[in-house]
Amino acid sequence: MEVKQMRFCYNRLWKLLIDRGINKKTLCEMSGVSATSLAKLRHGSNVNTEVLLKICNALDCDTADIMEFVRDESVISDTVESIITDEVPSVR
């Protein structure tokens, strides 16, 4: 059994900034979002939804314009298999 991780990807935000000629410092000033929060987005870390709303408000866009939900290619099938086999009693 394969289980794939899900995560948010913010590549759309970086593309939007490039298309509009806006750098990260300017986005911080426009939105009131800290440089630390932008660094978290750049590394795919969790951020508060208020950060996303501030960015969307500043850029006059929707959340779908700055992020997407993607399946991570790292598979944790070994862990799942061991859990399943440990729970099912073997018949001899």
Image (cartoon, rainbow, N blue to C red):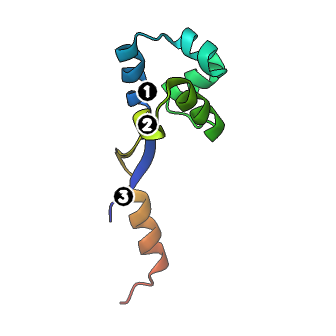
Badge 1 amino acid: Leu
The residue singled out by tag 1 in the image is 13
Where residue 40 sits, quadrant-wise, is top right
> Would you say the residues marked 1 and 2 are in contact, meaning their CB atoms lie under 8 Å apart?
yes
* Mark in front: 1 vs 3: 1
Residue 58, image x and y in percent? 56, 24
> Would you say the residues marked 3 and 2 are in contact, meaning their CB atoms lie under 8 Å apart?
no
Mark 1 → mark 3, Cα distance in angstroms = 32 Å
Left or right placement of residue 35 versus residue 81 in this view: right
Quadrant of the rendering where the N terminus is positioned:
bottom left
Disc marking residue 67: 2
Badge 3 amino acid: Ser
Q: How many marks?
A: 3
How dense is the environment of label 3, judged by Cα within 10 Å: few (below 14), some, or many (20 and up)?
few
Mark 3 → mark 2, Cα distance in angstroms = 27 Å
Mark 1 → mark 2, Cα distance in angstroms = 6 Å
Residue at the image position 53 percent from the left and 28 percent from the top: 41
Left or right placement of residue 33 versus residue 16 in this view: right
Sequence-wise, the earlier of marks 1 and 2 is 1
Badge 2 amino acid: Met
Which residue, as the protein is rendered here, is positioned at the far front? 60
Left or right placement of residue 56 versus residue 37 in this view: left
Residue at the image position 58 percent from the left and 37 percent from the top: 46
Q: Secondary structure at mark 1?
A: helix
Quadrant of the rendering where the C terminus is positioned:
bottom left
The residue singled out by tag 3 in the image is 77
